[in-house]
Amino acid sequence: MTDLATTDDLFFTRAGMDRGRVETLVAESLDGADDGELFLEYRQSESVAFDDGRLRAASFDTTQGFGLRAISGEAAGYAHASELSEDAIRRAGETVRAVRSGGGGVAAPGPSGTNASLYTDTNPLGEVAFERKVELLKEMDAYARGLDPRVRQVTASLSGEWQAVQILRADGSRAADIRPLVRLNIAVVAAQGDRMESGSFGTGGRTGFAACIDPASWKPQVEEALRQALVNLESIPAPAGEMQVVLAPGWPGILLHEAIGHGLEGDFNRKKTSAFSGLMGQQVASRGVTVVDDGTIHDRRGSLTIDDEGTPSSRTVLIEDGVLTGYMQDRQNARLMGMQPTGNGRRESFAHAPMPRMTNTYMMAGERDPEEILRSVKKGLYAVNFGGGQVDITSGKFVFSASEAYLVENGRIGAPVKGATLIGNGPDVLTRVRMIGNDMKLDPGVGTCGKDGQGVPVGVGQPTLLIDNLTVGGTQAG
C-alpha cells in the first residue's frame, strides 16, 4: 500500500471525512492566499524506561489532528485541532482567512513530487512484544553491573514512534509520508570511594527495533557508557584559558549544529538577525570547510522523504570551501528571499506551524590523518563528547560543556578532565579551523533540536577538527 493510500485510510475512511469535500474546504480557505496547506497527522508513540533494577515508566500514546495555514506575504494564519472532522477544518478555515490578501493573488506553485523512499513504512511498535522490550532493558542492566563492580546505577530506555502525515494544497495536490523512529539509551553511574561519575550512550534512526534487541548492537553501547563513566572517575579539573582544541569526529558536530547551523536557517537571515546575514558568497570559514545539510540519507534520524510542507528533502551545501553558498529554507522564507525551498520546513506536530529547521547537518571530511592532527598539538584539549550548550543566534556566541575531554601535551593524549566548557563565536570559530580530518562520522542517532519551543529529530556529524585559540572555561588556570 502506498503512503497516500495508507494515509487516506487513516484520515478519511476511518475519520469519516470525504476527501473531495476536504479538498474543497482547503481551496476555499486558501483562496487569495500566497501559500498554505492542510497538514494531517496520526502518531503512535511508546516509551519504556528501566531504572536501578526495576521498570520505572511505560507509556503508549496515540495522537491525531490537523493544522491549517494560510500565508500572505510575511503574515501567516494558523489554526489546529485534535478533532479530525470536516466541521473542525471548516472552522479553522474561517480563522486563517483573516490573513488572505483579499483575492486575486497568484498562489505559489506546490512542491514537485518525489518517488524516493528513505525509510521503511513498517510500524516499529508492533515488531517486538512489550514484555521483550522490558526484558531487553533488564538484560542491559544486568550486563552493565556484571562488567564492573564499581557500577552503582543503570538507567536504560527504549522508545519508538510511527508518524503518518498527509499535506493537501489549494490546487488539489497531495503528498504523504510515513515515518518510523526508534531510540535506545543507556546511562551508567560508577563509584570509587566517595566519588561518583556517569557516562551515557544511545543509538536510533528511522528503522525498526530489530537492531536494538540484537546483543551484538546493544552490548557495545553498554560498554561505551561504562567506559565514559570510568574515564570520568579518573578525571582532573579542566584548565582554563585560550588553547588549541581538537574535536573528535561524530557527536561533537553538535557544536557545529548549534553555533553555526541555526545561523544558516532562512528565517533568521531574512529577518537579518543571524550573524551570517548578508554574507552570501563571502568567505566565512577557513579554506577546506564544507558544511552540508542533508535530509536524504537513508534511515537516519534527521532524514525526511518530504518535509512538513510536502517539499522533498534535499542535500543543501551551506558552506563550500569556506564560502557561504546556501541557507536552509521553508517555502515562506524562500519565496520572500527570492530563493528555492530546500525541504527544511519542519514542525513538531500538527499543533505547530512549520519553520526552517536542520535535518542532518555535518562538515565534510578533509585530508588529514587524525593522528597527525593530535601530534601537531603542543598543549591543548581533546574534546570527545558534549553535554549541553547554548548559542545566541544574533551574535553567534556559544557555550558548550564537554562530557568527555582530555589534556593534550606534546602531541599525546593525557589525563581526562572534568568541567571543561568551550566558549566562542560560531562564525569566528569557522575561521580558526586549521586542520580537517579524513574521518567524517555521523552521530549515533539521538539528536533532538529545539527552536521556538518545538523539538524535532536531527542528525549531526563532522571529522576530527583542530581549532586554534579557542577559549576553554575550566576550574584551574591553564
Image (spheres, helix red, strand yellow):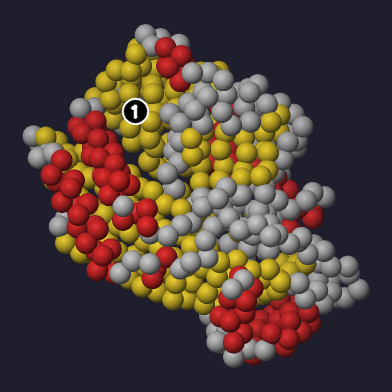
Dot 1: element: strand
Identify whether 77 is placed above or below 339: below
Based on the displayed image, in which of its 4 quarters is residue 11 positioned? bottom right
Q: Amino acid at mark 1?
A: Ala
In-front residue for pair 382/469 = 382
Residue 384, how many percent across, how many down?
38, 31
Identify the residue position indicated by label 1 in the image. 405
* Identity of the residue drawn at 45% across and 27% down: 247
Residue 410 percent across, percent down from the top left: 37, 8
In the rendered image, is residue 393 in sight?
A: no
Give the image quarter of residue 7.
bottom right
Residue 201 in the figure: left or right of residue 193: right
Count of all numbered marks drawn on residues in the image: 1
**Residue 455: x and y, percent?**
50, 57
Q: Nearer the viewer, residue 101 or 17?
A: 17
Q: Residues within 10 Å of mark 1 (few under 14, many from 20)?
A: many
Considering only vertical position in the picture, is 474 above or below 378?
below
Q: Is residue 165 left or right of residue 29?
A: left
Q: Is residue 204 left or right of residue 104?
A: left
Residue 245 position in % (x across, y down): 44, 22
Dividing the picture into quadrants, the one containing residue 385 is top left
User: Would residue 296 be visible to someone looking at this image?
Assistant: yes
On the rendered image, what quadrant is the C terminus found in? top left
Q: Residue at x 73, y 36 (%)?
A: 325
Q: Residue furthest right?
A: 104
Is 114 on the left or on the right of 246, as rendered? right
Identify which residue is drawn at 69% across, 31% down: 320
Position of the N terminus, as image quadrant, is: bottom right
| Residue at the spot 51% in from the left edge and 68% down from the top edge | 163
